Amino acid sequence: MLAAPINPSDINMIQGNYGLLPKLPAVGGNEGVGQVVAVGSSVTGVKPGDWVIPANAGLGTWRTEAVLSEEAVISIPSDLPLQSAATLSVNPCTAYRMLMDFEQLQPGDCVIQNASNSGVGQAVIQIAAALGLRTINVVRDRPDFQKLTDRLKSLGAEHVLTEEELRKPEMKNFFKDMPPPRLALNCVGGKSSTELLRHLAPGGTMVTYGGMAKQPVIASVSQLIFKDLKLRGFWLSQWKKDHSPAQFKELILTLCGLISRGQLTAPACSEVPLQDYQRALEASMQPFVSSKQILTMC
């Protein structure tokens, strides 16, 4: 292994409240990048020196070495930035599929999302920009809001708003200059998701892929009847079950192409040596953290 990030889903898995739990004893970590050191005589798909990422969750990437089957990994270009390679197989995949699979969006269409500074949120901003989509990005208010706004806009965000701003009556004027979003991406739940629904275009879809507030999604009856809004969920592990390994590899290579063209970068990262894992875990669970902790093994 070369590097592996700490994601919220990794923490959930360790806590025992994730939708997929490995048999114990287990190694933590669901994504990362490794370099092939040696292969068995019957292996044809990878060779020593190749960079590889996990084909599925639950591989256990927080370690220095692993012996795996050929089917457990996917080869990727070894000239990718290390942080991009280490964070390739979860957040960008989730962002790309949610943008592509729920609404037939065209260039100029608008997407609204909360938790916009998360790993998925940053990937959504960049992939949407590459596709010609406009984004309204909602974040919690914080002391360094302007600094965060500048960073997200540098990634391609058109608008960055706080949760409080989104609730103000003046937002009616804001949407006179923006097409109402047809797609909302919800990682928070609770009041935040209610606000996303309020601004969705009639017939639009809200996709929930996380629940950081640990509160339910509440939709009014009028939104369902008179606006015909659709509530959907997305879980990358389920998408992979419903699609072939070849389709997942195609998705990975599509994202590699965006990275190579400079249209997709890794989220803000802090590299921490594996032996300092406790410091990295503590940092990853702090509020308002926009930097993803990446364990480095080399």
Image (cartoon, rainbow, N blue to C red):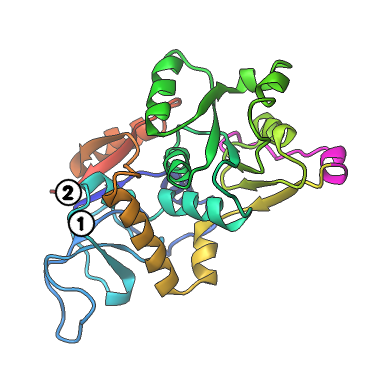
Residue at 42% across, 45% down: 130
Decide which of 24, 2 is in the foreground and name it. Answer: 2
Position of the N terminus, as image quadrant, is bottom left
Residue 245, x across and y down, in percent? 41, 73
Q: Secondary structure at mark 2?
A: loop
Residue 207, x across and y down, in percent? 63, 48
Task: Characterize the local packing of mark 1: few (<14), some (14-19) or many (20 or more) Cα atoms within 10 angstroms.
Answer: many
Task: Characterize the local packing of mark 2: few (<14), some (14-19) or many (20 or more) Cα atoms within 10 angstroms.
Answer: some
Residue 39, x across and y down, in percent? 15, 76
> Which amino acid type corresponds to the residue marked 1 in the rendered image?
Met
Residue 112, x across and y down, in percent? 59, 36
Mark 2 — residue?
297
Q: Quadrant of residue 251?
A: bottom left
> Which amino acid type corresponds to the residue marked 2 in the rendered image?
Met
Left or right of 169 in this view: 209: left
Mark 1 — residue?
1
**What's the magenta bit mostly, secondary-structure-wise?**
loop
Residue at 27% across, 51% down: 260
Name above or below for residue 47 compared with residue 100: below
For the question of whether residue 207 can be seen, the reply is yes
Q: Work out how far the residue at label 2 is from the one at label 1, CA to CA, in angstroms.
A: 6 Å
Tell me the magenta residue range: 212-226
Q: Is residue 225 rendered magenta in the image?
A: yes
Residue at 29% across, 53% down: 32
Name above or below for residue 40 compared with residue 269: below
Decide which of 255, 58 is in the foreground and name it. Answer: 255
Q: Earlier in the sequence, mark 2 or mark 1?
A: 1
